[in-house]
Amino acid sequence: MRWTDSRDIAIALEEAHPETDNVNLRFADLHRWVCALPGFDDDPAASNEGLLEAIQMAWIDERD
């Protein structure tokens, strides 16, 4: 997975952190969790606020 794979990342995050309040989370935590996902293979420094926000929105959508 890469930073732009927001839907796949959201699914993996929901599986890894099902009890997390994914609406009120810090981007620093989100960044750390994404980088720790099995199958994530992108440069940790390549993320930005827009990518993290897209992942968060996809995760919120995934939970609904």
Image (cartoon, rainbow, N blue to C red):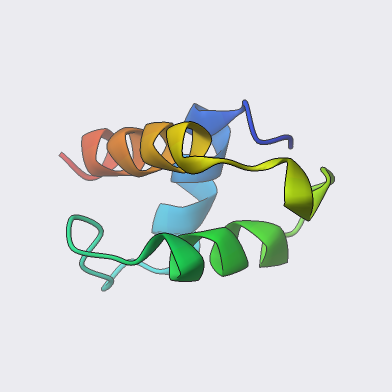
Could you say which quadrant of the image residue 1 lies in?
top right
Does residue 22 appear anywhere in the picture? yes
Q: Does 3 sit above or below residue 30?
A: above
Pick the quarter of the image with the C terminus.
top left
Could you say which quadrant of the image residue 37 lies in?
bottom right
* Nearest to the observer: residue 41 or residue 38: 41
Q: Position of residue 4 (x, y in %)?
A: 62, 26
Q: Does 23 sit above or below residue 7?
A: below
Q: Position of residue 47 (x, y in %)?
A: 64, 43
Does residue 39 appear anywhere in the picture? no
Q: Is residue 49 left or right of residue 26?
A: right
Q: Position of residue 25 (x, y in %)?
A: 28, 65
Q: Is residue 9 left or right of residue 2?
A: left
Q: Does 34 sit above or below residue 11?
A: below
Q: Is residue 12 left or right of residue 35?
A: left
* Nearest to the observer: residue 42 or residue 45: 45
> Which residue: 18% across, 63% down?
24
* Nearest to the observer: residue 46 or residue 32: 46
Q: Position of residue 35 (x, y in %)?
A: 69, 60
Q: How many marks?
A: 0
> Which residue: 65% across, 35% down?
3
> Which residue: 83% across, 46% down?
43
